Amino acid sequence: MSVHKEVKKVTTHQLQEMKRRGEKIAMLTAYDYTMAKIIDHAGIDVILVGDSASNVMAGHETTLPITLDQMIYHASSVIRAIDRALVVVDLPFGSYQGNSKEALTSAIKIMKESGAHAVKLEGGREIKDSIERILSAGIPVMGHLGLTPQSIYKFGTYTVRAKEEEEAKRLMEDAKVLEESGCFALVLEKIPAKLAEQVAKSITIPVIGIGAGSGVDGQVLVTHDMLGMTHEFSPRFLRRYLNLYESMSGAFQQYIKDVKSKDFPNESEQY
Ligand code: KIV
C-alpha cells in the first residue's frame, strides 16, 4: 500500500471560489527550480513566472528583452518543482502584440514546452482578440492592467497609474472587457487602492494586486524583492520579509575569509 499523500493542486476554478468565499489569494514569482520548490512547499496558491525575470535574473533594465524561449526555460524549471501551486507564465514582449494568431502560437509553445498551467498578457481592449483566441485553444489567461511594464517607453516612468479620472475610467472598462473575454483572473499593478477596490467589486474574477492596496482579492510580490535580495529597489508597496542581501553578503565574505585563511576546509570537511 502506498503511503504517498496526493497533493490537491490549485486550479483556476478554485481561485474563483476563493474570491467568492472572501479568502485572499497569495501569489509570488519564481524563475528557477530551487526557489519554486521552497515557495510551493510553503503553500503558495499561484506562482508567476514573470517577465520580471528579465530584470531579476538577467539584469536588464526593462522586461522588454526577454525572449519566448528564455521564458520557457524559466517556466519548465519551475514546473519541475511544483506539487500544488498553479503556475502562470508571462507572454513576453513581442510574442503576442502583432496579431491574435501570433499570440496563440506563443501561448501554445509555452504550454507545450514548459508544462505551465496558464499564461498572462498585459493590456486591455487592444488585446481582446488575442485573449479570446488563446482561450479558444483551452489555455487559461490571466490579464494585467495598470502599470504594465512592457509599455514602459509609452508611460515614460514606473509611477502610479490611473490617478486621473480618464485613465481610471478606461481601466474600469478594460477590466470588464477582460472578464467578459474569459480571463480567469486579473493583476492590477501600481494603481490607487480605492480604484483597485472598485475594480475588484465590479467583476466576478479574482483581482490580484501589486501596489494596489488591500481591497483586492489577492496579492503578488516579486520574490527577490520581498526577500530583500534586490536592496536597491524600494517602492512604498514592498514589504521586505528578510534582508537576504545582507545575510548573503555576510556569508560570502565569511567564505572568502575562510578560504584565504585556510580555515576551510578543516579536517572533518575532507576525505
Ligand atoms: O513580471 C512580473 O513579475 C509581474 C508581476 C510584477 C505581477 O508581472
Image (cartoon, helix red, strand yellow):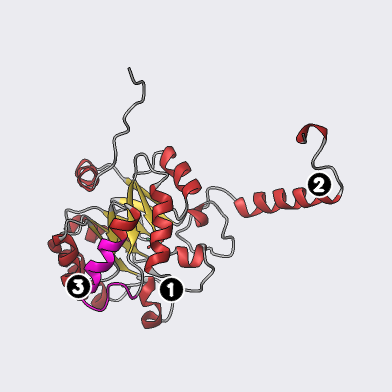
Which residue in the protein does label 1 denote?
158
Residue 258 numbered mark, or none: 2
Look at 87% across and 48% down and name the residue there.
261
Our reading of the magenta stretch's main secondary structure is helix
**Quadrant position of ligand 1:** bottom left
Look at 47% across and 67% down and name the residue there.
54
Look at 17% across and 56% down and name the residue there.
138
> Does the stretch in magenta take in 37?
no
- 104 above or below 5? below
Question: Please, what is the three-letter code of the amino acid marked with disc 3?
Answer: Lys
Q: Position of residue 137 (x, y in %)?
A: 16, 60
Q: Secondary structure at mark 1?
A: loop
Q: Position of residue 100 (x, y in %)?
A: 19, 73
Q: CA distance from mark 2 to mark 1?
A: 42 Å
Give the position of the N terminus as an image quadrant: top left
Question: Please, what is the three-letter code of the amino acid marked with disc 2?
Answer: Asp
* Crowdedness near tag 2: few (<14), some (14–19) or many (≥20) residues, C-alpha within 10 Å: some
Q: Position of residue 132 (x, y in %)?
A: 15, 65
Q: Earlier in the sequence, mark 3 or mark 1?
A: 3
Look at 19% across and 59% down and name the residue there.
183
Q: Is residue 207 left or right of residue 52?
A: left
Judged from this view, the residue extending furthest toward the front is: 271
Q: Earlier in the sequence, mark 2 or mark 1?
A: 1
Q: Which residues are magenta?
A: 94-109
Which residue in the protein does label 3 denote?
101
